[in-house]
Amino acid sequence: MTIETTTHLNFDGDARAALDLYASAFGGEVTAMTYGQMGASDEPAWADRVVWGQVTSPAGLRVMAFDVWPGQPYDQGANAFYVYVHGTDAEEVTRIWEGLLEGAEVRQPLGPSAWAPLAGQLRDRFGVIWALDVAPAAG
């Protein structure tokens, strides 16, 4: 049996823009369905909001996102979770960092750390906290 996890992010109207950012940063394409396409809401204001969406990168990273259901409370919280990206290639991790950087709050600049040759943390412009690092060399 194989089990995998996928980070599922909830938004209140920004899901498509967030998915576009993540596709740009990680590579891959956005796959999304709106409330209007699914017939999931009769409210015109919800027609273009994302009811299901995801980005799958060529390297295998997958992030899912949607805009919370009409009437469902939305509270992003201040520090509820991080999306942790752990890689083996410093160039690739740096490229992802740079893709997420526009409009972000840098919480830890990308650079050498006590546990990794390269690590950093930022809160992207949608409020999602990303922690990135590169695996230390074996030995």
Image (cartoon, grey):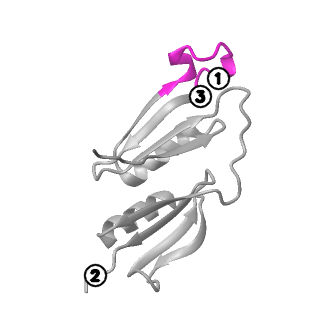
Nearer-N-terminus badge (2/3): 3
Q: Is residue 56 above or below residue 93?
A: above
Residue for point 42% across, 62% down:
85
Which residue is under mark 3? 49
Q: Secondary structure at mark 3?
A: loop
Which residue is under mark 1? 46
Which residue is under mark 2? 137
Between residue 19 and residue 136, name the one nearer to us.
Answer: 136
Residue 57 locus on image (x, y percent) = 33, 48
Residue 25 locus on image (x, y percent) = 42, 54
Q: Which of the labelled discs sits on residue 38, or is there none?
A: none
Q: Do labels 2 and 3 touch, CB within 8 Å?
A: no
Asked which quadrant contains residue 112, the reply is: bottom left
Query: What's the magenta region?
Result: 33-48
Residue for point 35% across, 49% down:
27
Q: How many marks?
A: 3
